Image (cartoon, grey):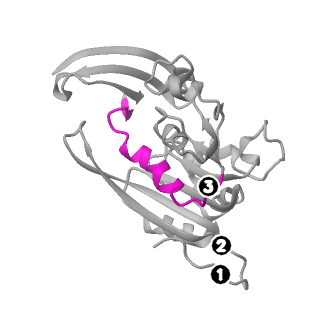
Amino acid sequence: MLTSLQELDRCQTPLGELTLWRRRSASQGGTEFYEVRLDGEFLMSSLVNHSEIALAKLALAELPDGEWDILVGGLGLGYTAKAALDFPNVRSVTVVEYLEPVINWHRWQIVPLGVELTTDGRCRLVQADFFDMVGPSDGTVEANPASQTYHGILIDIDHSPCHLIRASHAPFYETEGLRRLAAHLAPGGVFALWSAEPPEEEFLARLHTVFADAKACEVEFFNPLVDEKDTNCIYIAAGPRRHRGSKSSSSRFP
């Protein structure tokens, strides 16, 4: 039984009507949590963040020692960015979010991680279309954060490589789009993508075409919103594949 419900923000966006709610539910033991909806459809909840955290943890665990610059596509409620910042090796985290209201929720500090993300000097929030940015470098980092290279690129934007929020995102998931992204990885860097759906063999095959190593990790967790176990998928890829005729490096992944 719902005991408390408060609408914190409602606004029209290019994707539809976006709403932010704060809830307290008796079925969750009175726990307070936050929920985001788009045109009335559930988008995300602060109660369900295990795989968003795993996106950063699994990917960055693959990186060698040193100082890391991380690019995150999709801010949401901030759990991937915060998990990246928790790594002591992380020098900077640049988060690119398409919807300005989502960035404002953190700057206004009305969502749980707003204070932590906006007061950490290593974290930068950028309002832009991530997929438009990931293209040929123009050499202007301030105009386009994706024009520099990163040790880790983490993306949580679409529901899956086949289930997209916007049709315009589709080219990114094709071979050429993945090649453009790979160009923004520093040597030894890693790319990771969150998906709500099981591993898709066609997409994994494209990753193997572009990267020397690629794998799909299924992340199981208990989802209190549906009161049962749930599974998401994290794709991880590293080492852009060398040109034909060059010697291939050994696999980093088991």
**Residue 186, numbered label:** none
SS at circle 2 = loop
- Amino acid found under the numbered disc labelled 2: Arg
Q: Nearer the viewer, mark 1 or mark 3?
A: 1
- The image quadrant where one finds the C terminus is bottom left
Please give the range of residues in magenta: 41-66
Whichever of labels 3 and 2 marks the residue nearer the N terminus, that label is: 3
* Residue underneath mark 1: 248
- Amino acid found under the numbered disc labelled 1: Ser
Residue at image coords 47%, 27%: 113
* Residue underneath mark 3: 171
- Amino acid found under the numbered disc labelled 3: Pro
Q: Are marks 1 and 3 in contact (CB under 8 Å)?
A: no
CA distance for labels 2 and 1: 8 Å
Q: Nearer the viewer, residue 97 or 222?
A: 222
Mark 2 neighbour density, 10 Å: few (under 14) some (14–19) many (20 or more): some
Q: Is residue 65 left or right of residue 226?
A: right
